[in-house]
Amino acid sequence: MASHTHETTTQQEPSLDAVLGTVAPRLRALRQRRGVTLAQVADSTGISVSTLSRLESGQRRPTLDLLLPLAREYRVALDDLVGAPPTGDPRVRPQPVVRHGRTYIPLSRHADGLHAFKVIFPAPVSGAEPEKLKQGAHDGYDWIYVLTGRLRLALGDTETILEPGDAAEFDTRTPHGFASAGPGPTEVINLLSQQGERIHLREV
């Protein structure tokens, strides 16, 4: 009887190949939903166009070093990307991702709606003149709260210094960029809505 129960349970559990097999269509759907090309994703993640194409067609086996930057690029949790079944555990076990010197720590795991991150911006180079911030624009709405350090926030032609306890919100269709204002690193909480909806904070 015990052997039969084990066999039945094993048959009900999806195999690793079956789970990974769902990644290709998910990657393609996420990219198309964002309206970006393979070349644009390649530029922002450092993954070659040919590798991205093979991932989306199922010809390349997805690995963690490929999935982590793509999960960050598409602003989804890794569990959502591979379609992992829910466990009933509400806790989020963040896996930090480092890109361009910044550390992103996901604080939420939902594929749609609001996303929460803790972001650590490295300290600027000591003695160097502050560089003009690189700016980008995309659909969404951003809310930022500074925990420690000082944050440079560029919005178009305007640049603002945010101190600890300061918050800012803006439509991400406006060109924007961030960096630590120094002298040390800067830690922020970042809430982002993909749909461009403003973030509503209720007083308790």
Image (cartoon, helix red, strand yellow):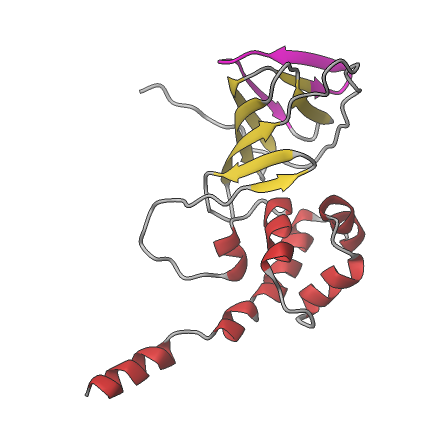
- Quadrant for the C terminus, please: top left
The quadrant in which residue 44 appears is top right
Q: Which residues are magenta?
A: 154-171
Q: Main secondary structure of the magenta part?
A: strand
* Magenta stretch encompasses residue 155: yes
Q: Residue at x 35, y 79 (%)?
A: 10
* Magenta stretch encompasses residue 152: no
Q: Is residue 84 above or below residue 100?
A: below
204 or 70, nearer to the observer? 70
Residue 105 spot, x, y in % from top left: 52, 38
Q: Is residue 96 above or below residue 79?
A: above
Q: Residue at x 67, y 53 (%)?
A: 31
Residue 102 spot, x, y in % from top left: 63, 33
Residue 197 spot, x, y in % from top left: 55, 32
Furthest residue in direction front, as rendered:
126
- Quadrant for the N terminus, please: bottom left
Q: Residue at x 58, y 39 (%)?
A: 195
Side of 188 where 50 appears, left or right: right
Q: Residue at x 67, y 12 (%)?
A: 160
Q: Is residue 138 above or below residue 78?
A: above
Residue 129 spot, x, y in % from top left: 79, 14
Side of 86 where 19 appears, left or right: right
Q: How many marks?
A: 0
